[in-house]
Image (tube, rainbow, N blue to C red):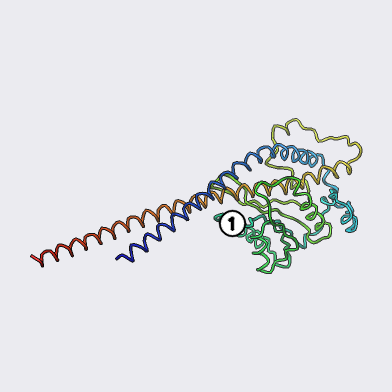
């Protein structure tokens, strides 16, 4: 019985240490969630405006000339740090589909990663795509490792996204994505990630990104319907339509990618906080159960000792 009591005590001590660790991780995730939510609120003001501009340009049919646009050469793109904005309007038959999958680099985030991967696989199967037809651009190590092991083409992966991502960090990522589109690595592109609803809930989103067209951007949920009232889709361009689009379209692409990363990272912190809270609550339940088991075992041991003492005393009498 003594050995059993010692074992229970060790289990209680071990579980209490686990509770302290998961409790601390919950506090850290909650703090990160609070920080990124404040950052997201301020960023959405910019995102709303740039998407509103793109929506207006779509209404004025300035995005309809994609078939006649000739993208820059591969050599020009490699020697220039600027994003070729007009190439994002080029439309061609969709022989290969690109999918940007945003996951985390680490675990302990509940069902966050599994939900993104599961829904992305359903998107692939729903489009009747094979592994040869799909090109994965993985943001986050979990998604990169998963799709590599299953035979998907992952020509580019981006790991180590910061807890509070910065907008400027996405420039090279967006340029790489656009350059791969110019090189015809894929003919259409979707961005798949978990949209943050609250700390307990996130929902999967698959947003079309390339080619940019009026169909993709005409009904963006960040634009204000009140801004559209009385809008007349007529513009006088200075210096030219192409010059305007060369500036606006890369900003739109960057805002879409960065907004998805920011949203996904917010969802990741929320999932991590919820998972750690659940783990902490479970540890408390285990400790309570073990303490009850320990007290019962101790009472049983005391009762046995009293019975033995009483029996010995009776034998002496």
Classify 10 Å Cα crowding around label 1: few (below 14), some (14-19), many (20 and above).
some
Q: Name the one closer to the observer, 317 or 121.
A: 317
Residue 159 drawn at (x, y percent) = 69, 57
Q: Residue furthest right?
A: 239
Where is 15 relative to 229, above or below?
below
Q: Residue furthest front?
A: 316
In-image side of 127 versus 88 (left or right)? left
* Secondary element at tag 1: helix
Residue 93 drawn at (x, y percent) = 80, 59
In-image side of 119 versus 303 (left or right)? right
Q: Name the one closer to the observer, 135 or 315.
A: 315
Q: Name the one closer to the observer, 43 or 300.
A: 300
Residue drawn at (74%, 51%) of the image? 209
Q: Which residue is mark 1?
A: 115
Check the picture and name the quadrant holding the N terminus: bottom left
Residue drawn at (67%, 57%) of the image? 140
Where is 229 relative to 154, above or below?
above
In-image side of 230 versus 295 (left or right)? right
Residue drawn at (75%, 38%) of the image? 52
Residue 212 drawn at (x, y percent) = 78, 49
Residue drawn at (37%, 53%) of the image? 288
């Amino acid at each position: 019985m003594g050995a059993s009591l010692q074992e229970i005590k060790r289990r209680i001590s071990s579980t209490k240490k686990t509770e302290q660790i998961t409790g601390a991780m919950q506090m850290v995730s909650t703090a990160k969630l609070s920080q990124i939510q404040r950052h997201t609120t301020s960023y959405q003001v910019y995102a709303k405006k740039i998407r509103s501009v793109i929506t207006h340009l779509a209404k004025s049919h300035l995005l309809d000339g994609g078939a006649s646009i000739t993208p820059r050469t591969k050599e020009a793109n490699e020697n220039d740090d600027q994003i070729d904005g007009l190439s994002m309007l080029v439309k061609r038959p969709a022989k290969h589909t690109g999918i940007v999958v945003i996951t985390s680099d680490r675990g302990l985030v509940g069902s966050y990663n599994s939900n993104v991967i599961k829904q992305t696989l359903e998107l692939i199967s729903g489009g009747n795509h094979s592994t040869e037809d799909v090109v994965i651009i993985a943001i986050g190590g979990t998604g990169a490792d998963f799709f590599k092991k299953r035979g998907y083409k992952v020509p580019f992966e981006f790991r180590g996204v910061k807890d509070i991502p910065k907008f400027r960090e996405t420039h090279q990522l967006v340029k790489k994505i656009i350059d791969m589109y110019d090189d015809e690595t894929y003919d259409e592109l979707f961005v798949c990630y978990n949209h943050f609803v609250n700390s307990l809930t996130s929902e999967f989103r698959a947003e079309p990104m390339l080619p940019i067209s009026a169909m993709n951007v005409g009904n963006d949920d960040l634009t204000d319907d009140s801004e559209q009232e009385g809008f007349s889709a007529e513009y006088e361009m200075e210096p030219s339509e192409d010059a305007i689009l060369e500036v606006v379209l890369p900003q739109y692409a960057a805002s879409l990618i960065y907004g998805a990363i920011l949203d996904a990272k917010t969802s990741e912190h929320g999932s991590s906080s919820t998972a750690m809270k659940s783990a902490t609550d479970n540890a408390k339940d285990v400790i309570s159960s073990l303490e009850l088991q320990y007290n019962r075992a101790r009472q049983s041991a005391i009762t046995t000792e009293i019975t033995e003492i009483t029996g010995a005393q009776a034998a002496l009498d």
